[in-house]
Image: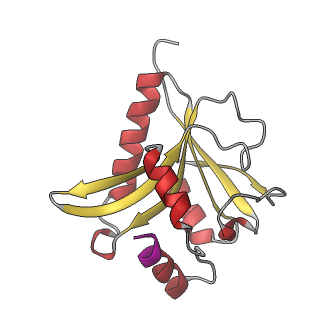
C-alpha cells in the first residue's frame, strides 16, 4: 500500500515517498505502530502512529501527543472519509490517555496537503529543515511543515 501511495504521489506531485526498507516495516508492525482502517474485508488505508518523534518535533520527548505518519489510502477509498475516521480514533486515544494533541508532518512545499490538514482541524505550527535525518526514510531530506490538532480533554 505504501508503494501504491508513492506511485499516486508521483502522478500528482513532484514529491513522493522513496520506499521503505522491509526491516523498518517489520519493526513497526512488531511494535504495533502500523494500523489499518478496514471496511468489511477491504483495507481502506494504513497509517503509522507513534507516541514520540524527537527527530522531527525537537524537545518533545515529554509531550503527550500522538504522531501520525505515512497515511496511505487505497485508490478506492480516497476522498471517502479515511482521515476523519483516523482522527476520531486518535482523539479517542488522546482523551482516554489524557493526552493533548495529534501531530503530523508533511512536505512544506506541498501546499495542497498542508491545506487539507488545516481543513481537518490542524493548525500550522512551523516549518523546519530537519538537520538529523539519520534513520528516517529518504523522503525526509527536505523542509517539513509541522501541524498540530489540539484535543480537548475534560477533567483537567
Residue pictured at 38% horizontal, 49% vertical:
86
Where residue 123 appears, as percent x and y from the top left, is: 61, 47
Q: Which residues are magenta?
A: 1-5
Left or right: 129 as drawn, with respect to 18? right
- In the orientation shown, which residue stands out farthest toward the top? 155
From the image, give the main secondary structure of the stretch colored magenta: helix
Relative depth, front residue between 39 and 137: 137
Residue pictured at 50% horizontal, 77% vertical:
6
User: Magenta includes 4?
Assistant: yes
Where residue 87 appears, as percent x and y from the top left, is: 41, 45
Left or right: 8 as drawn, with respect to 129? left
Residue 46 position by quadrant: bottom left
Residue 34 versus residue 17 in the image, above or below = above
The total number of labels drawn is 0
- In the orientation shown, which residue stands out farthest toward the left? 40
Left or right: 94 as drawn, with respect to 52? left
Where residue 103 appears, as percent x and y from the top left, is: 58, 45
Image quarter of the N terminus: bottom left
| Residue 143 visible to an observer of this rendering | yes
| Residue 120 visible to an observer of this rendering | no
User: Magenta includes 53?
Assistant: no
- In the orientation shown, which residue stands out farthest toward the bottom? 11
Residue 71 versus residue 85 in the image, above or below = below
Residue pictured at 41% horizontal, 32% vertical:
93
Left or right: 120 as drawn, with respect to 125? left
Residue pictured at 69% horizontal, 27% vertical:
62
Amino acid at each position: 500500500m505504501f508503494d501504491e501511495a508513492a506511485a499516486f504521489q508521483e502522478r500528482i506531485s513532484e514529491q513522493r515517498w522513496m520506499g521503505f526498507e522491509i526491516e523498518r516495516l517489520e519493526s513497526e508492525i512488531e511494535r504495533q505502530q502500523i494500523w489499518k482502517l478496514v471496511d468489511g474485508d477491504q483495507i481502506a488505508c494504513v497509517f503509522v502512529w507513534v507516541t514520540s518523534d524527537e527527530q522531527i518535533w525537537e524537545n518533545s520527548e515529554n509531550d503527550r501527543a500522538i504522531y501520525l505518519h505515512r497515511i496511505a489510502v487505497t485508490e478506492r477509498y480516497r476522498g471517502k472519509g479515511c482521515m476523519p475516521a483516523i482522527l476520531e480514533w486518535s482523539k479517542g486515544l488522546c482523551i482516554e490517555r489524557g493526552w493533548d494533541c495529534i501531530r503530523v508532518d508533511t512536505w512544506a512545499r506541498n501546499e495542497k496537503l498542508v491545506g487539507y490538514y488545516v481543513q481537518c482541524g490542524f493548525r500550522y505550527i512551523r516549518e523546519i529543515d530537519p538537520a538529523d535525518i539519520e534513520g528516517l526514510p529518504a523522503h525526509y531530506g527536505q523542509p517539513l511543515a509541522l501541524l498540530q490538532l489540539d484535543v480537548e480533554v475534560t477533567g483537567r
